[in-house]
Image: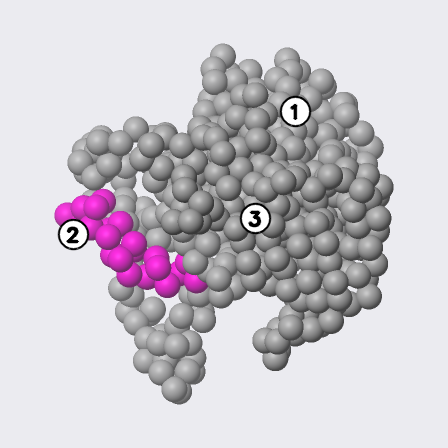
Amino acid sequence: MSEKTSVTAAIGGGVIGGGWIARFLLNGHDVNVYDPHPDAQRLVNEVLSNAERALRRMTMAPLPTKGKLTFVSSIAEAVRDADYIQESVPERLDLKLKIFAEIEKHAQPDAMIGSSTSGFRPTQLAEGLKTPERLFVAHPFNPVYLLPVVEVVPSAMTSPAVVERASAFLTTIGMKPLVVRKEIDAHIADRLLEAVWREGLWLVNDGIATTQEIDDVIRFGFGLRWAQMGLFETYRIAGGEAGMAHFIAQFGPALKWPWTKLMDVPEMTDELIATIASQSDAQSGMHSIRELERIRDDNLVAIMQALKAKPWGAGEILKSYEDGLYAKAHAHAATANTEPSGPLALHTDRVREDFVDYNGHMTESRYLQVFGDATDAFLHYIGMNTDYLATGRSMYTVETHIRHLREVKMGEPLRVETRLLGYDSKRARILHELFGGPGDELLATAEHMLLHVDTKKSTASEMGEELRRALANIWAYHKTLETPDYAGKPVRNIATDGL
Ligand SMILES: NC(=O)C1=CN([C@@H]2O[C@H](COP(=O)(O)OP(=O)(O)OC[C@H]3O[C@@H](n4cnc5c(N)ncnc54)[C@H](O)[C@@H]3O)[C@@H](O)[C@H]2O)C=CC1
Ligand SMILES: C[N+](C)(C)CC(=O)CC(=O)[O-]
């Protein structure tokens, strides 16, 4: 299932259902949506548009072609052909039970059925089902299209093979499935979140802090730590050289004093609700919810990209997701171009929002970005994959000549055609032609010299046999193509040749 585009079904397209729909679609899966809300299509499309924007900022890796979104008018229609079904209806057990009974009637026998429930145990959800072995909790985090973790909670009746298949599928769409070994109300994360939220409500109720001040201690302080190390690893460091045991000896007793209110919940009086709502308005009321979503998404993307450079935590997941996308694109390119009788079509993109400069056109550095991505696609195509790189060999670009011929505007499609202009045992000379805009015109060209290197010694070295064979195969065709007259020419010398 992970290798082919599959059909997914989303039952419920609200905040969380919308996020799942976006994640499925943007990873190339078709989605059938059932949600009786009169505005469901508009709401889902708004979430989808924010998700597309966020994903394009998060990764330069070649995303699969977007899946097909279909709104249907019954659960039966939604689930009939689906391999993976995700329920995200409101958190009411009676409603969820009705929904699962209906899903069970119409789903394929081997369909995987996940529930987004924040708190119910899978055993509760499976009550009355004839096939409880395919049901599990798949509890995500908002925004589902960006945050990787998903708590996968099986009941004692869930088949281990289903858990394995579901985890594999969720991994292919960029998530980190965390299989919860024992079902419990509210799984793992919401037990932690609820405890923090409850204390936050007390602090407002007792007039100790405003919503803004509570958010500030999180975002300027321990929230930053949590984004990269979580709770226990952070506290290990806080114990100094004596580590965790010393930390517990020092701060453990405070848990019994106690500093916190534990299970008491403040009465949600009209007064408390009004206080929290007005403080929240003062803090964030100047932004619409969609604007706040975009601010949040940009910040999350920046954090994950920073962590990817390490790679660490959520950045490690992003890195392996991208490696998977490149590997898929490479495999696709390899099958699509087994007979490279013409230029290779290995890379497509779109002029993204952050590609555009103050003139409203694609900015200079982004041309190199697109050509660089096309070179990566070419290198993947000739076999320079992670296994090859792991042997301490790579190819570096040592010379580039870009010609800018036409402008291109935001949102317009881009595609690159690549040809080999020559090669020897250490070098490959390639030419990219970038086409795009409404008329698919030639926008720019880039000629590059690539040098094979021993990455440990940082010196030029002989290519591996597999790369040489791939280049020979391409060259057999590309040597017959007419070389454009601009290829190999330097930038015009206006001092001697005039303008
Ligand atoms: N909002 C959050 O932060 C998170 C929520 N969850 C869980 O996700 C589930 C959904 O929560 P939200 O998306 O926040 O709620 P929501 O209220 O935003 O969305 C629920 C959607 O279900 C639809 N719906 C109602 N009855 C339906 C039916 N019979 N068939 C199909 N659709 C129906 C509604 O029209 C609505 O669009 C809940 O179980 C919740 O616990 C999980 C993680 C985070
Ligand atoms: C508030 N909540 C219980 C619905 C939160 C979640 O379930 C997870 C999240 O995204 O915070």
**Residue 27 showing in the rendered view:** no
Disc 2/disc 3 C-alpha distance (Å): 71 Å
Classify mark 3: helix, strand or loop.
loop
Label drawn at residue 68: 1
Disc 3/disc 1 C-alpha distance (Å): 45 Å
Q: Nearer the viewer, residue 16 or 68?
A: 68
Tell me where the magenta segment starts and ends, as one range: 206-228
Classify mark 2: helix, strand or loop.
loop
Mark nearest the camera among 1 and 2 is: 1
Residue 452: x percent and y percent? 67, 66
Mark 2–mark 3 CB contact (< 8 Å): no
Instruction: Name the kind of residue labelled 3 in the image.
Output: Lys
Residue for point 22% across, 45% down: 211
Label drawn at residue 208: 2
Q: Earlier in the sequence, mark 2 or mark 3?
A: 2
Q: Nearer the viewer, residue 102 or 442?
A: 442
**Residue 239 showing in the rendered view:** yes
Q: Which residue is mark 3?
A: 489
Residue 292: x percent and y percent? 33, 36
**What is the quadrant of residue 460 in the picture?**
bottom right
Label drawn at residue 328: none
